[in-house]
Image (tube, rainbow, N blue to C red):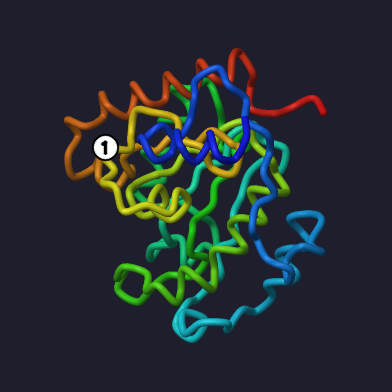
Amino acid sequence: MDDLYRLYLKTIGIQYLPGYQSEQVPLPSGDKVEHSKTLEDLREFIGDCHRCQLGDTRTKLVFGTGNPRADIVFVGEAPGRDEDIEGEPFVGKAGQLLTKIFRAMGLAREDVYICNVIKCRPPQNRNPLPVEVTTCKPFLLRQIEIISPVVICALGSFAAQTLLETDIRISMLRGHFHDCYGIPLMPTYHPSFLLRDPNRKADVWEDIQKIMKRLGSGTGDREN
Ligand code: URA
């Protein structure tokens, strides 16, 4: 598909064509992180990060966890209090619900890769500032590029809007695959939102089933 046709489709609101495997587009993760060939390299490159002010208030930087060869990457917003203490994403109440979702998919936490847009906890869990997103996003993009998953699942509006570079609401985005640099991305509601509004669990299950269909019977780990 040429760029003009892709742009035309995007303009009329079609971001991803089911059954159409778009070419892998190099993610614009930036020159500085390009030399990081593995997740370990990237983690080392990030180091004891103070590139934004969150470095001054966090306890632990929460890089990401799981299978570096996973078929699916789950992306949340930012670490909360529990994650800040543990240094691992989604270990609090929302994380426990997310782990249940994995189990319903026939997967364990170790089968998938889990990370956030922002690697350090914003004080009092406030919304991340634009400058914090701009600073941290290249690391997320490089993580995705290194893992090269079959599917990305964006948890909540912040992750979905950041990765798709849109301000369309999550209720409109969810339920359909969108193109994220050639990788199909399914936005769905954030587990914290489900804890507040359990009636939305059915929607999330619908989204997850579409993801499972896309993954086929794969267990989450690729053979090559
Ligand atoms: N919420 C998120 O978005 N990420 C976490 O790691 C925990 C809670």
Q: Nearer the viewer, residue 179 or 118?
A: 179
Circle 1 residue: 172
Q: Is 138 positioned to the left or the right of 196 in the image?
A: right
- The amino acid marked with disc number 1 is Met
Residue 38 horizontal/vertical position (percent):
79, 54
- The picture quadrant where one finds residue 122 is bottom left
Picture residue at 64% right of the left edge, 27% below the top = 220
Q: Nearer the viewer, residue 87 or 193?
A: 193
Q: Is mark 1 within 8 Å of ligand 1?
A: no
Look at the picture and state if 47 lies above or below 118.
below
Q: Is 26 positioned to the left or the right of 200 in the image?
A: right
Q: Secondary structure at mark 1?
A: helix
Q: Is 33 positioned to the left or the right of 132 in the image?
A: right
Residue 2 horizontal/vertical position (percent):
62, 35
Q: Quadrant of the N terminus?
A: top right
Q: Residues within 10 Å of mark 1 (few under 14, many from 20)?
A: few
Picture residue at 59% right of the left edge, 14% below the top = 216
Q: Quadrant of the C terminus?
A: top right
